[in-house]
Amino acid sequence: VAIDFRLTASQRELQLQSRAFAKQVLRPAIEADALPTPEERFAATKPAYEAMVAAGFLRKCVPLSAGGESAGLTDTAIIVEEFYAVNASVTLTLIGTVLGLLPLLIGGTKEQRSRLLPPFLKQAGAPLAAFCATEPGGSANAASPPPGEGVRTTARFSSDRWIIQGRKSWVSSATGWDRQGADLLSVLCRNDPDAPAERGISIILVERPATGLVFERAIDSMGHRAHLLPQFALEGVSVPGDNVLGSPGGGLALTAACFVGAAALVGIFAVGVMRMAFDFVLGFARQERRGGIHPIIEHQAVGYALADAKIAMEATRGLCWRACQAVDMQSPGAEELAIEAKVFGSETAVRVLTDLMRVVGVESYDHALPLGRLLQDALALPVFGGGNIGVRRRRLHAILQRPDYDPLTACSQVEV
Amino acid sequence: MAIDFTLTAQQRELQLASRKFAREVLAEASKAEFLATPEQRFLATRPTYEAMVAAGYLRKCIPAPAGGDNTGLLDMAILAEEFYCVNPSVTLTMLGTVLGLLPILLGGTPDQCKRLLVPFLKTSGAPLAGFCSSEPGGSANAGSPPPGEGVRTAARREGDGWLINGRKKWVSSATGWNREGANVLCVVCRTDPAAPPDTAISIIAVEGPVAGLVFERAIDTIGHRAHLVPQFGFKDVATPRHNLLGQEGTGLALTAAAFTGTAALVGIFGVALMRAAFEFALHFARTEKRGGVHAIIEHQAVGYALADAKTTIEAARYLSWRACHALDTQSPAAEELAVQAKIFGSEAAVRVITDLMRVVGIESYDHEAPFARLLQDALALPIFDGGNMGVRRRQLHAMFKRSDYDPLAASGAA
């Protein structure tokens, strides 16, 4: 098809269905945010997540080729935009699970997929998967040569099994509903202590129950208050030899591939929060007079602030959709576009939300209004899924340095 | 005196003493922020606030002619920077009390000062004052002519006093430690229902405990988690006639004067929060390798981000100092500079802290690191004490429209 931004009839249906589900199920579940501890908050979202799975939304994020119903990342983007701003915590539990499955979906064999995917294809229960990349002390230099430590979690091959040792942090849902571990963990670990990073690191799958998984703490995060971000250890966790994904040593490349699609979705998270903030502030500006004669939308400064916010939001959505389509088409510009969608969308969201707070004024500082929550959620976007400073360096800067880099590649894909 | 940015020996002493007090007393009180409700959090800070009063810091914010120890806004800026970067909630309780006293200090008669300031000049207890300006529904257009509602709280003469009715919101510490009201409330209210706003609105002092004060709720704010910002009503609150401050009907001018003084301090609040974020980020960048070979400060992107942050901090600090100095010397440029310090410092703080979070990366999103709290506190600065959108319009925009406005007046070179 030619350049076209219209939704298909089935995408429109998916959008409306997602919107209705968000309103009926995800919005009430936001009450979990008020509970005192991170684990209580996460536990309280389980019924909403179960409802999400039962309604088929997890299946809708797994590709058709793997037994799910996803027709592509653009469709996932449509769901996510409807879900994320209404309830960022539960939506991230869903998308974190999809990210946890991506190494299996991208790098797994048919046998591995048919063995490990079934719990995620049922429309029952609250199955969780997690991509265990980040470690305490940070993973922005996972590919560092010595003396940089790079990936510190190790896997040793012994009697046909991998024995995993190390610590991880910031992994969505990794320790599961009961501290015993998610149903499936994709663990990034060093399987060859002597090889260079490009050949010494692998992704190995750990199934629940993971004996040796030691819960350390649930991070009290600034936003996504009802999402579980644990810090934990893997102490001699033993898994079958055939749980390694792809050829051993290809873990960093597989990680990079997984984060391309995820990056495009982070841009859509940003669109979601901006959209909800904009709707709220537009309504406020139209109705509120703040003691004056006219609704404040009559003020030029308010009108211009709203205009700039809406422009930023539309630019982000267009870029993200383009990135999703490029990922779906396996376009050569896909990586560049996805990273740009993540960097641009995430930083735009933080700026637009703070600007919109100023339109509303001090009322926006009250948690009775949604802007505080939305901004606290949005502040994660530039620093999670790969922090923007590291992502610019490792992904964009690296692409731009290649001698064969062509700036027009991103916009020059021709219909076949 | 010539242009000079050196501290006097006394200012340096004040700075070091404040820094020590902040470290030894205020830091500990941050624990209050983790309690469940806004009122529990506020109550938990009371011993710290009492210690602040006992150490004479409240007196240091009250001018010498009124019986205090204050030697100027610049000195308050030095003190505020040290306190605010460690504990914004309790610091705001003290400076909110100072703001609550400003209409008395600026507009009160010697008799009113003498009578109403007594509890605040002692170095004991936990005296609170609140400047009751904002109302539910907003007060960005307090000076609106009809049909705009402007100030909705009304005072009518009743016998030898005033009866006040209305509702207020976002007033620091207004309902006090026990919901019965601060020691003194300075209430912006309409004293003449028929007159235009410039002659209809007055500020009337109400002494606590306040019969007729109706506590509605303590706002659950994004930041300043252990500071009390209530919503409440006045139901036939009676106060003596001689508690009207300044000339009847000049309340809006007195309000503007009070907020101009605090605007310069809001710029310093921004400096304080940026400074705390910078110190953490610099240390992190110097010590953390994040799995790589070098400390991350070796990365050019990190170095430049830190450079831009530090540049902004220094610019905000000197603009704020300049504004304080202009107020201390009653320069004609004081209003312009104070408002600019508020707008620049507040918006810079939000931007700089978010930029520094990106240097640290995901660890900054954990409440074990200070960024979340610092940013949650900073988010108030552009919207409290007069939201920046309204302040730009009512103060800077209005000033620039005056035919005699001279841009060089602010630099003293007109």
Image (tube, grey):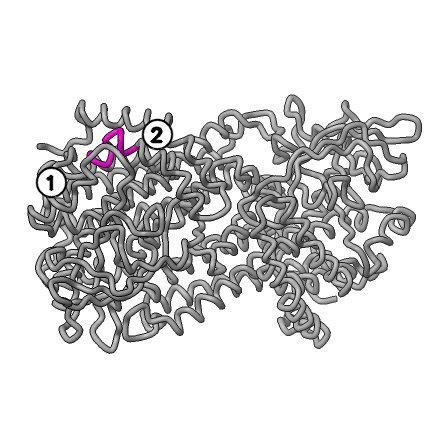
Residue situated in front as seen by the camera: A36 or A144: A36
Disc 2 marks which amino acid?
Ala
- Pick the front one: B327 or A66: B327
- The answer, for residue B347, to whether it is visible in the render is no
Residue reaching furthest left? B110
Specify the subunit that label 1 lies on. Answer: B
The answer to whether dots 2 and 1 both sit on one chain is yes
Which is closer to the viewer, label 2 or label 1?
Answer: 1
Q: Is residue A97 above or below residue A281?
A: above
* Image position of A224 (left or right of A253): left
Q: Residue at x 55, y 27 (%)?
A: B288
Residue A34 position, x and y percent, is 56, 52
In x, y percent, where is residue A165? 77, 28
Looking at the rendering, the stretch of residues picked out in magenta corresponds to: B52-59
The chain letter for the residue carrying disc 2 is B
Decide whether residue B54 is among the magenta residues. yes
Disc 1 target residue: B66
Mark 1 closeness class: few <14, some 14–19, many ≥20 residues within 10 Å = some
Residue labelled with disc 2:
B22
What kind of element bears circle 2? helix
Q: Amino acid at mark 1?
A: Ala
